[in-house]
Image (cartoon, rainbow, N blue to C red):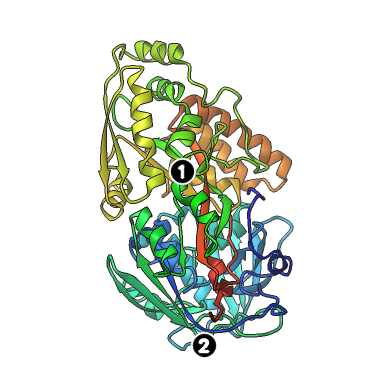
Amino acid sequence: MSQHFTVRRLTLLLCLTLPVSLVNTAQAQTSGGILRAGMQADPVGLDPHVTQATSTRNQLENVYDTLVAFDPSGKIVPSLATKWTTSKDGLTWTFTVRSDAKFQNGRPFEASDVVYSINRIKDPATKSPRSGDFELIKNIAAPTKTTVVFTLSKPFSPLLSKLAFSLNVIVPKEAAATLNTKPVGTGPFSFVSYTPQTRMVLKRNPDFWGRDAKGNKLPYLDGITFSYLPDATARVTALQTGNVDWIEYVPSTAIQTLKADSKVTVLGGPSANYRSIFFNVAQKPLNDARVRRAIAYAINNQEVVDVALLGVGGIASPGTVIPTGNYYALPDAGYGKPNLDKARALLKEAGYPNGFPLELKVTSTYDFLRSPAEIIQAQLAQIGIKVTINALEWSVYLPEILKKNYAATILGESGQGDPDDYLYTPFASDSGGNLTNFKDATIDKWLDQGRMVADPAARKRIYANVQKRLVDLSPMVFLYSSTQYEGDTKNVQGYVHFPNTSYIGLRTTWLSKP
């Protein structure tokens, strides 16, 4: 994970140990207040085990807890589990879990809830897009109320990373049937209500187990109200006029303006995600790797960043979905540098010397996914590919993509830390997160090996091979990894930006009095 990130209060960051034990209260800190948050989009489903939407994750990750969690540097730290051990053969993982946590329905959390939750994600009937995260778990048992034992069929190095992903949360069995209308977790905020296209309301959970460095109970806020402002300009204006206290996804066009505004603060930086042109490789002519590679040769991703994202909204991909700076990333020196002669030659070889029509389905909700479309359209016109852009609102667009009802689209995924997040999830043949219909036996073999090997150097060699082959086969054209910024008013204190695009930092946020 990239280590470049910005926080406003370095003294706060220096005392971080757990995502829920963040704040050194030597600073003047006032509990209370309801944070008004301006959000880009509605959640797409409220059941965390079923949805794949970042919008759902960001609004509900403070209602729930995971077994372990990521801190702002990408390190895995305790959460509902306080400690864990692994057997020498890597097949048995034993977790000790908290005895002081309660679900928001009042029932004490215990180890059997971990067993239920992970089995629910694994169960094909749930249709979780992350069922593959736990497919190597042969058995989960809770021998005591505070002990969970995972038995694996094979060693699985990314297990902690999967357990830390903030949609793989722990839920109570008795509430599972209604999670899509009434989320229930152990997190710092309780769900109150959701009004589509208007707001989601959370209130402080008085029974939350988390405490700050001085032992004070978290969270500080009395609640959070998420309001939906899909228009980026409207979101920025709402922040500047004080109609909201905090906004997500500060658009590239507003970053410099807001940084110059004395009433607000902008914080963020490179994020642990990627954005690509996804191809549905089951559709002709995109079922031909030569056609896909030709498109890759025609794309100038630096131009996409410079023009569509104004040079500040992303970092052009060096030829991999793994963000720049990650230990496992393998740059390709020629990637993103157009070679139109090679592109035309490959199209001719594939039987399309004059190009072909292509629908590019995008979402109108996220400017960073919509704005590159015209530039890509112009770039592909140079090799005879006539792109038609079809822009849809997010709640309409995402179900279409999840059903793989598209030819090409601009989309991405937020990794959390392990290379498996970036490579297995989107490219393994049997992965629930494979949205391209891409299948390659060689890559499948390497991805399986990467999951079983613990040594970082050996894993790096395996993932280097995967990344080279993905460039050759081009199920995606890698565009950029994002920069992501949040903005807040000066009375918002204690918020920490997480580079993995998490809003766990809201757990330690408070509002100072004017």
Q: Is residue 95 visible?
A: yes
| SS at mark 1 in the image | helix
Q: Residue at x 35, y 35 (%)?
A: 373
Q: Is residue 124 visible?
A: no
Q: How many numbered marks, from 0 up? A: 2
Horizontally, residue 150 falls left or right of residue 287, namely right
Label of residue 206 in the image: 2
| SS at mark 2 in the image | loop
N-terminal of the pair, mark 1 or mark 2, is 2
Looking at numbered disc 2 in the image, what kind of residue is underneath it? Pro
In the displayed structure, 294 sits above or below 345; it is: below
Looking at numbered disc 1 in the image, what kind of residue is underneath it? Pro
Q: Nearer the viewer, residue 42 or 304?
A: 304
Q: How crowded is the residue under tag 2: few (<14 C-alpha within 10 Å), some, or many (20+)?
A: some
For residue 28, what is the image quadrant? bottom right
Image location (x, y in percent) of residue 199: 33, 71
Label of residue 426 in the image: 1
